[in-house]
Image: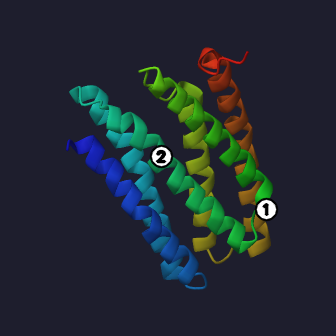
Amino acid sequence: MNLPNKLTLLRVILVPVFMAFMLFGRDREWAMVMGLIIFSAASLTDMLDGQIARREGLVTTFGKFADPLADKMLTTAAFLVFMDYGFIGAWPIFIILVREFAVSGIRLAAAADGEVIAAAFWGKFKTVMQMISIIAGILMLCIPVIPPDTTAVITAILIWISVLFTIISGAEYIIKNRHLLKLK
């Protein structure tokens, strides 16, 4: 197994660790800081695995499949934490998951035709925006001078902005790959 794929697997392993710190250490500042560090490190592995894979010619079918899955696991875990905290409702998570299921379905259809679809610009941008909004939300939790209500509002706004990019990237993905849907 090459280094980029190991980084992707590390990201998957970090997801439940991140959730544990955020949910079980909810009222402990040190746990929030650990959650922030773990999420940030996991997000960094997303950037690194792709760069290393392309630079070193280590792009694999496994990586093309596992990398976006690891991203979805990481961001969904954070959104569920924010929902548990009462920062966001079910709608943004629902919209994000619908997009992710649709894209995964298209990827499966492509795989059935022997085609592997790598992430496009808007999909990558969407992931970056989601990760930035999540890191900002967790960071505000780590700063005790920011009132929880303010943190909740700012986090919700940032997540809804990332939802907008989620919709744009999903629409682009469907339009670009509509030939795979074979609607007749």
- Location of mark 1 (residue): 89
* Residue appearing at x 68%, y 46% in the figure: 96
Q: Which residue is label 2 attached to?
A: 69
Is residue 85 something that shows in the picture?
Answer: yes
Residue at 54% of width from left, 83% of height from top?
Answer: 24
Residue located at (74% from left, 46% from top): 95
Label 1 neighbour load within 10 Å: few <14, some 14-19, many 20+: some
Is 175 above or below relative to 81? above
Which disc number belongs to residue 166?
none
Callout 2: SS: helix
Q: Quadrant of the C terminus?
A: top right
Circle 2 Cα neighbour tier, 10 Å, few/some/many (<14 / 14–19 / ≥20): some
Q: Position of residue 88 (x, y in %)?
A: 76, 62
Using the image as rendered, state which of residue 131 and residue 29 is in the foreground: 131
Q: How many marks?
A: 2
Q: Could you tell me which quadrant the N terminus lies in?
A: top left
